[in-house]
Image (cartoon, helix red, strand yellow):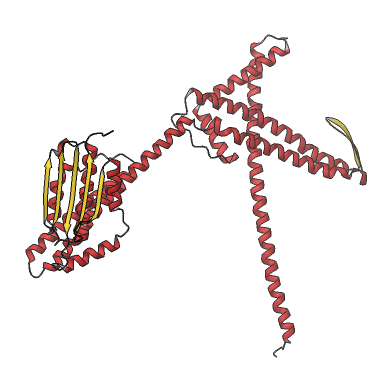
Amino acid sequence: MRTLIPPRFAADSRKGRLFSRFSSGFSSGISSRLADWFSDWFSGWFSSWLYAFLGAAVAGLLPLVVAVAVVAVTPAGGPGPVRAVLLLALWAALCAAAGRSRLARSASVRLANHLLGTALPAPGSEGSGRSHRLRTGAWLVLHALLGGASVAASGLLLMAAVALPAVWLRGGDRIVFFLPVDVAGGGPGAWTLPAAALLLALAYCIGEGMSALLRRLAPPLLGPLPAERLAALEGQVRVLAQRNRLAQELHDSIGHALTASTIQAAVAKELVDTDPAAARRALTGLEEASRAAMDDLDHVLGILREGRAPTSPQFSLTDLHALVDRVRRTGTDVDADITGDLAAVPATVSREAYRIVQEGLTNALRHGGRSAPISLRVAATGAWLEMEVANRINRAAHPVTHALADRARRRRRGGQGVTGITDRVHLLRGGISVGPDASGTGWLLAVRIPLRSTS
């Protein structure tokens, strides 16, 4: 039998369900936040207490060993001050001896990172010097003293916080806690509850204060020295510079190979029916360019994986003729005028200049296609190295390859080719001019680099 519910009661029922869902979600959210806060608070307090306890253990065990040694080396009935001074001296000597061990420093750093929440770097091979040994010994002494004092004070406060309410609940009595304290039963003794809460808060503050102090002292005592931090930063800069250089070289070599391969594939497709021999030559050039690009990629990826410095020979200006031949195999007419003693060009300038010419030829192919002749001029004379790459764009001659070049240029718009050339030229303190030529029908790259310091 169907039950009819009046609309007003149905609406009230829906509101009740919505309120129930909202209240349950709100309460669950608050309870979740409280649980997370309590978990974080407890884990932080427990870590601090555990770190202090480890210090107390060191402060307790070492004096025990030292006391045995003192009793063994001092005559019976000796004066108390002499024994106390000898005890402290031997205890400090033991801490200093422990600080000489790299294991002690490594363990201290790991404990501080895990229990105090510091972010100290792991000590390296430089962590065995005299300064490191002294700082490690000082840290062990501070850890032992502060940890022992913190555990002792917190333990006494916790015992008092438990003893006062316990005596009150048992009807009252006199307890001696440094001083005699009379605890009455019933209402007059209810003051023990807020007193216990205050003692607990004080114990917590002592532990947190000890942790905060050690957290502030950890970097100067366990961290690297300024010279070591500077050396680490310089190492990171060298790694980043090497990776950036590899990325730039990979961009230049792969970009050149892909551009040449794209044009050769278009040539092969265009001539496969009318001139099979030329199409086969284009496919052979495509295969060689792809293989060279794969070799470059494997070389760079191997360096990045292994973190080693590049050891294979790098291209220089003496390899320009081979580069020009590869471009000519795409069917592009390259008029190369290379003069001067390229082998005498400084190695760094020669390597960077090769990449500049390579990227210039790649851009000329990308802008003009294989039908646009390219003019290359490289002259190493006197104190300057001059390079020019120019082409003329004739779109009516080969519309297919020009359309292909247009698509490639649109895909690579905003790329890093010209930016990479400019960066290389500025690094070598040279001058650069790049863009359309004076007639507006061609593309021109002109670079001038000093071969000797001009400062």
Residue 58: % across, % down: 63, 28
Determine whether, in the image, residue 60 is placed left or right of residue 351.
right
Residue at 67% from the left image edge and 46% from the top image edge:
42
Outermost residue on the front side: it is: 438
Q: Report how many numbered discs are placed on residues in the image.
A: 0
Q: Nearer the viewer, residue 197 or 238?
A: 238
> What is the x, y in percent for residue 406?
24, 65
Q: Quadrant of the N terminus?
A: bottom right
Residue 420 visible within the image = yes
Residue that lies at the very extreme toward the bottom in this rendered image: 1
- x then y, percent, for residue 429: 28, 40
Is 262 above or below relative to 299?
below
Foreground pick, 265 / 287? 265
Left or right? Give the position of 248 relative to 402: right
Whether residue 56 is visible, yes or no, is no
Quadrant location of the C terminus? top left
Q: Is residue 406 above or below residue 63?
A: below
Q: Residue at x 72, y 86 (%)?
A: 7
